[in-house]
């Protein structure tokens, strides 16, 4: 059983709350739901909230009055200074609340800054985004993806959330799934890879039979055309470059991963994507689930070749 965490009201603030969140109890559409929920406000003012992008459903801003609602959905009503719509080709926001931001990162974007790159990072883009409503707002790093790995990342919006997640990471992160295209056809359709990993002076991780940190990954072949295979990989541990090193060790490096033994680069990128993230919300105790489809090039590279 997963550890449960204390529930606190989402909008507990001094003075009037800037955002109110309401859980949908029965199927409805958005405008009738808002008219009932905000019965003290006029129809015109409620339509104004919609038109100004101050209503969200499950963390996504919507202006559509006929948006369908299902039991369990969360409707957010934002009363503060309206944040400008945020649209960045390198980073898509999947979920946002008072505590967390969950995003889908494009390959080629660093998670955090390095000595060479200071500005064009997921951290910097999101930091600028949250400051649109209040210059005092901050975000906090929880985990990282390699520059050339795409997929789901999560950031904290306050120190308390960061501390609670990081100090209970193994209990609160309940599932992490990656999709990868590897070179060749694997002998086993599914397997559990258990390895010891160490890092050399060149900052490259490799499998060793001696000392090191234990890494456990379960994979399943989704499709293959002989030259390439699409894998679904579930992490049971979260070591640096775990999947990349383990796939190299069994003779099937990730396509495009020349650092870890790949001989081909069919999509001109590292073909590794963080596709699913499941975690216990640190404030509500609810299990959250986010999933993104693998990039189209993953499917085209592993498609069956026509005669």
Image: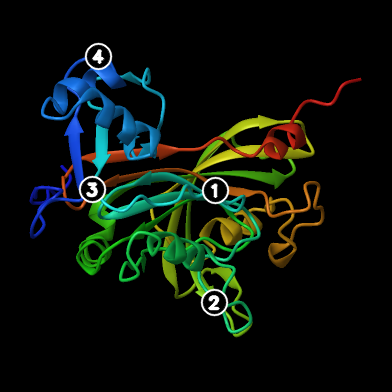
Alpha-carbon span between mark 3 and mark 1 = 25 Å
> Of marks 4 and 3, which one's residue comes earlier in the chain?
4
Alpha-carbon span between mark 3 and mark 2 = 32 Å
The residue to which callout 4 is attached is: 27
Helix, strand or loop at label 3? It is: loop
Quadrant hosting residue 263 = bottom right
Do we see residue 58 in this rendering?
Answer: no
The residue to which callout 3 is attached is: 281
Picture coordinates of residue 287, whole percent (x, y): 24, 40
Quadrant hosting residue 206 = bottom right
The label on residue 87 is 1
Asked if labels 2 and 4 touch by Cβ distance under 8 angstroms, the answer is: no
Q: Nearer the viewer, mark 1 or mark 2?
A: 1
The residue to which callout 2 is attached is: 199
Camera-nearest residue between 253 and 62 = 62
Picture coordinates of residue 56, whole percent (x, y): 33, 36
Q: Nearer the viewer, mark 3 or mark 2?
A: 3
């Amino acid at each position: 059983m997963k550890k449960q965490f204390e529930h606190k009201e989402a909008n507990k603030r001094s003075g009037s709350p800037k955002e109110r969140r309401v859980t949908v109890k029965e199927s409805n559409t958005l405008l009738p739901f808002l008219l009932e929920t905000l019965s003290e406000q006029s129809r015109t003012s409620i339509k104004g909230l919609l038109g100004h992008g101050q209503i969200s459903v499950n963390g996504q801003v919507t202006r559509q009055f006929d948006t369908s609602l299902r039991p369990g959905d969360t409707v957010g009503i934002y009363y503060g200074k309206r944040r400008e719509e945020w649209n960045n080709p390198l980073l898509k926001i999947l979920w946002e609340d008072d505590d967390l931001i969950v995003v889908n990162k494009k390959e080629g974007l660093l998670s955090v800054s390095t000595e060479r790159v200071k500005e064009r990072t997921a951290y910097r883009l999101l930091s600028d985004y949250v400051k649109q409503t209040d210059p005092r707002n901050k975000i906090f790093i929880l985990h990282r993806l390699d520059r050339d790995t795409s997929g789901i990342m999560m950031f904290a919006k306050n120190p308390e959330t960061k501390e609670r997640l990081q100090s209970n990471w193994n209990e609160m992160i309940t599932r992490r799934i990656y999709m990868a295209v590897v070179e060749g056809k694997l002998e086993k359709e599914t397997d559990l890879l258990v390895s010891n990993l160490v890092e050399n002076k060149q900052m490259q991780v490799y499998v060793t039979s001696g000392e090191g940190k234990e890494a456990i990954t379960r994979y399943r072949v989704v499709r293959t055309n002989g030259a390439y295979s699409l894998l679904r990989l579930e992490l049971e541990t979260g070591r640096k470059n775990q999947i990349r090193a383990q796939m190299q060790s069994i003779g099937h490096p990730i396509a495009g991963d020349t650092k870890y033994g790949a001989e081909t680069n069919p999509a001109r990128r590292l073909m590794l994507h963080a596709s699913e993230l499941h975690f216990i919300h640190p404030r509500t105790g609810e299990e959250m689930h986010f999933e993104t489809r693998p990039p189209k090039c993953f499917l085209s590279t592993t498609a069956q070749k026509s005669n």
